[in-house]
Image (spheres, grey):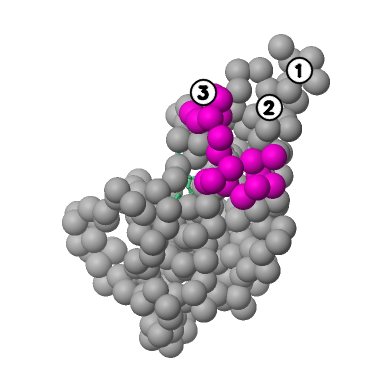
Amino acid sequence: MRLGVLGGTLDPVHLGHLAAAHAAARALALDAVWLMPSHVPAHKAAPTASPWHRFAMAALAAADDPLLAASDLELARPGPTFTWDTLQALAARGHAPSQIFFITGVDAFAGIETWRRFPDVLEAGNFVVVSRPGHALPEAVRQHPAVAPRLRAAPAHGGADLAISEGFCAIWLVEADTPDVSSTDIRQRVLTGQEVGAVVPASVAAHIRRHGLYTPTPAARRLHGEN
Ligand code: ATP
Ligand code: MG
């Protein structure tokens, strides 16, 4: 089973994430992609939805899509999220590193040198680096001695030499037309009363509305008496 994992704070999940998941699956013949919300790092800006709401939205986004499922693997683990730990956990469950494909946008992968256990993390799974409007992979990352030998182009519609993935973890570059959307922009739009129905699945837009997410006093917090 060739398993894709799309991690991130997913606060909220949006059409850019889904497009990246599908582009990676098409290019690399993945059998499934798990949307995997992470804990929110301390430096991320509020207001942010709780882990439960972020997971709920990932599950809604996956509901009608046979490729996708939501995974609670990172949220179930206490403390900050490190991809290294996630890849180890998947290996412990019997997924061979060469059959795991950790999907990121180029903006996220640009920081790979700062990730826990770099460069070993590059041997713990394949990475799929999907293009994102307005971002490019910095030359310094591309030419890093731990990165450069693993880089492979993955044609958007498949046909990459997948045989090399037998026992080897590559960094696959996928050029895809993902929409120019970010969760930051969506949170800002909700805060200022704008529609987000065009950039998240309809079920996710309804969830945000129903629960008053990304507004100063979310309805769910009022229900819990937290204001
Ligand atoms: P934020 O603005 O809060 O950082 P985001 O839109 O960047 O949100 P994340 O949860 O940070 O979303 O992203 C999760 C992963 O999805 C990252 O690897 C990111 O690069 C990737 N990603 C997000 N949006 C896109 C997009 N439009 N195209 C390609 N990759 C994307
Ligand atoms: Mg981001």
Q: Name the residue under label 3.
A: 192
Please identify the quadrant where the C terminus is shown.
top right
Which kind of residue does numbered mark 2 sit on?
Gly
Q: Can residue 109 be seen in this view?
A: no
Q: Which mark is residue 212?
A: 2
Snapshot quadrant of residue 222? top right
Give coordinates of residue 225: x percent, y percent.
79, 15
Give coordinates of residue 55: x percent, y percent.
68, 45
Compare residues 217 and 190 and report the one nearer the observer.
190
Seen at 43% across and 80% down, the residue is 158
| Image: 24 above or below 117 | below
Circle 3 SS class: loop
Camera-near label (1 vs 3) is 3
**Range shown magenta:** 188-206
Which kind of residue does numbered mark 3 sit on?
Thr
Camera-near label (2 vs 3) is 3
Which kind of residue does numbered mark 1 sit on?
Arg
Residue 99 among magenta residues: no
Seen at 42% across and 57% down, the residue is 178
Residue 194 among magenta residues: yes
Snapshot quadrant of residue 70? bottom right
The CB of the residue at mark 2 lies under 8 Å from ligand 1: no
Please identify the quadrant where the N terminus is shown.
bottom right
Compare residues 54 and 148 and report the one nearer the observer.
54
